[in-house]
Amino acid sequence: SQQGEEDPQALSIQEGENATMNCSYKTSINNLQWYRQNSGRGLVHLILIRSNEREKHSGRLRVTLDTSKKSSSLLITASRAADTASYFCATVMNRDDKIIFGKGTRLHILP
Amino acid sequence: GAGVSQTPSNKVTEKGKYVELRCDPISGHTALYWYRQSLGQGPEFLIYFQGTGAADDSGLPNDRFFAVRPEGSVSTLKIQRTERGDSAVYLCASSFDLRADTQYFGPGTRLTVL
């Protein structure tokens, strides 16, 4: 089963623009994570935000979490061609629990 | 240091055959996870280990799937009587322990059942 649902399913933007992806989930969580996947293979952990946090930054990434709306957003600023990938949100309900991934957003950066 | 490795990278088999997929976690990582990813979908949890024991195997789809980690390091995912619907990329990940926030993923094994 998949808890998170990303929106949009696909996104194409010009290089240099900002990309925003959203994730909605159904149950209360301990933390929410964002991963990137290139070419349908190994995933790379990008950032984690805990249920008591509202916003977090890492380089060009900004993640927000609204637990009242059960939603999160990932913002990539000043996009680059290398950012072209699929991005997944993943939720952890309780500490020590398994990670549940959403279906992902396919991001394409146009030159 | 070396990351998570998976072998083989690709496996083609015939319906009804038995397959084994191997995962070598990062040295020192006690937690190991298996996921299955179908085209256009996110990774689907199968099972995870803490040490040698399966902490949660609730994601295994049926009793044709089995995973072991006898020495607490390398893990093998075993699929009996493969079906065409088993075709997917099987991903392995490891983390320092179950409480670690970050999982490190291998490149996956693409399984094709003809």
Image: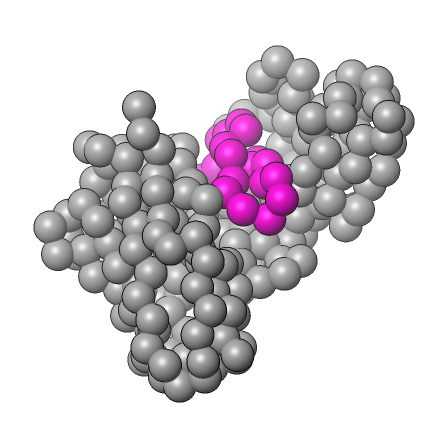
On screen, B22 above or below A15? below
Taking A15 as reference, is B85 left or right?
Answer: left
Q: How many marks?
A: 0
A32 part of magenta stretch = yes
Picture quadrant where residue B28 is located: top left
Residue B69 in picture, x, y percent from top left = 19, 55
Taking B26 as reference, is B103 left or right?
Answer: right
User: Of all residues shown, which one is farthest toward the top?
Assistant: A59
- Asked which colour scheme the image uses, the reply is one colour
Residue A42 in picture, x, y percent from top left = 50, 42
Picture quadrant where residue B35 is located: bottom left
Q: Residue at x 28, y 41 (%)?
A: B25
Residue A86 in picture, x, y percent from top left = 66, 42
On screen, A59 above or below B34? above
Q: Residue at x 65, y 21 (%)?
A: A61
B71 part of magenta stretch = no
Asked if one can make out residue A58 in the rendered structure from this viewpoint, the answer is yes
Taking B77 as reference, is A44 left or right?
Answer: right
Magenta span of residues: A25-50
Residue A67 in picture, x, y percent from top left = 61, 38
Q: Residue at x 68, y 38 (%)?
A: A85
Taking A104 as reference, is B46 left or right?
Answer: left
Q: In what quadrant of the picture does the C terminus of chain A appear?
A: top right
On screen, A83 above or below B107? above
Q: Residue at x 40, y 86 (%)?
A: B16
Asked if one can make out residue A51 in the rendered structure from this viewpoint, the answer is no
